[in-house]
Image: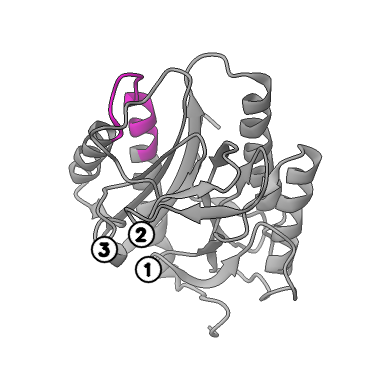
Amino acid sequence: MSRSQNVHTPEEVERIRFAAGVTAQVRDQIAAAARPGMTTFDLDQVAGEFIRATGGKSAFKGYGDYPGNICISLNDEVVHGIGRPDRIIQESDIVSIDVGVAINGALGDTALTFGFGTQPEDVARLLRGTKQSLTEGIAAARRGNRIGNVSRAVERCAKRFHLGVVRDYVGHGCGIQLHEPPEVPNFAAYGEGPVLVPGMVICIEPMLTLGSWEVKVNRHDGWTATTRDGSWSAHFEHMILITENEPEILTWQKTM
C-alpha cells in the first residue's frame, strides 16, 4: 500500500463485496420507488428506510455534516443534491441518486441517473453517453494499467457523445473508508496516476453535461453542485475490484 493507492486484504475484499452488493440493491429499490409528484425529501426518507432494512446505515448522512440519507440531484444539479420538501419531482425531470451504505465494517457507493417515459433526444444522448463512458472506463480498469487509462477512456467516450466532463468532482478509492486513494478523474490529468493492482477497489463515476464542465455550489445549502451554464447533467457510478483478470463490478445492476 502507498499514499497513492489502497490495496485491500482478501478479508476486506469480502466485506466490501457484501457492502457493495447491499448498496446496489438499495439503489435499485430507490429508483423503482421514485415517482413524479414525490418530493425529493420523500424519496430521501424512503431511501433511509431501505438502508435501515439492510441492517446498515447511510454512509453519507453526517459525513462532513451532509444532512441527507442519499444525494438526489435533478436536471442541472450535478451531484450532492439534498432532499427538500419543496422540490417536487416532475415527469419531465431526470433524477440522479448517489447511494452509500455502511455495513459490517465496509462501504458501498454507487450512483444512477434515470427519467420517466421517453426522453428528448439530447437528454437521451446524455444518459446513453454517460452510461457508455462508465462502461468504457471499467473496461480500462485492468491489472497493470494506470488510473490515467481509465480517465482517458471515460473522456474519449464523452467527447464522442459531445458531452462536457465535470472536473471539480472525480471518482475515488472506496471500501473501508468512503474516500480512499487514489482519485479517479474523468478527464486526462497531468501524470498517469498509480498502477492498478489486484485488491484495489475504485469508484468510477462519470459526471457529464450537455454543456460546459464548469459547476457552482449552492450558497444556501453549501452542498448542491449545479452546472454553471444551466445545462443538464447525468451521473453513473460503479465500484470496481481490480483482479488478476477482468475487473469485477461490485455494484452491478441488471437495469444498466
Q: Residue 256's quadrant in the figure?
A: top right
Residue drawn 24% across and 44% down?
A: 51
The CA span between labels 1 and 3 is 19 Å
C-alpha gap between disc 2 and disc 1: 6 Å
Q: Specify which label sits upstream in the sequence, 1 or 3.
A: 3
Q: How is the image coloured?
A: one colour
Secondary structure category for the residue under label 3: helix
Circle 2 sits on which residue? 107
Question: Viewed as shown, does residue 219 lie left or right of 152?
Answer: left
Residue 247 at x, y percent in the picture = 62, 55
Q: Is residue 38 magenta?
A: yes
* Residue at the spot 39% in from the left edge and 64% down from the top edge: 178
User: Where residue 95 sits: x, y (%)?
Assistant: 45, 32
Magenta residue span: 27-40
Residue 192 vertical placement versus 54 (above, below)? below
Q: Residue at x 49, y 24 (%)?
A: 115
Report helix, strand or loop for mark 2. Answer: strand
Q: Position of residue 26 (x, y in %)?
A: 33, 39
Whether the magenta-drawn stretch holds residue 52 is answered as no
User: Is disc 2 in contact with disc 1, using a CB cutoff of under 8 Å?
Assistant: yes
Does the CB distance between marks 2 and 3 fall below 8 Å? no
Q: Which residue is mark 1?
A: 176
Q: Is 83 located above or below residue 223 in the figure?
A: above
Which quadrant of the view contains residue 230? top right
Q: Residue at x 67, y 47 (%)?
A: 212
Residue that extends furthest to the bottom in the rendered view of this protein: 2
Q: Badge 1: few (under 14), some or many (20 or more) residues near its Cα, within 10 Å?
A: many
Q: Nearer the viewer, residue 256 or 125?
A: 125
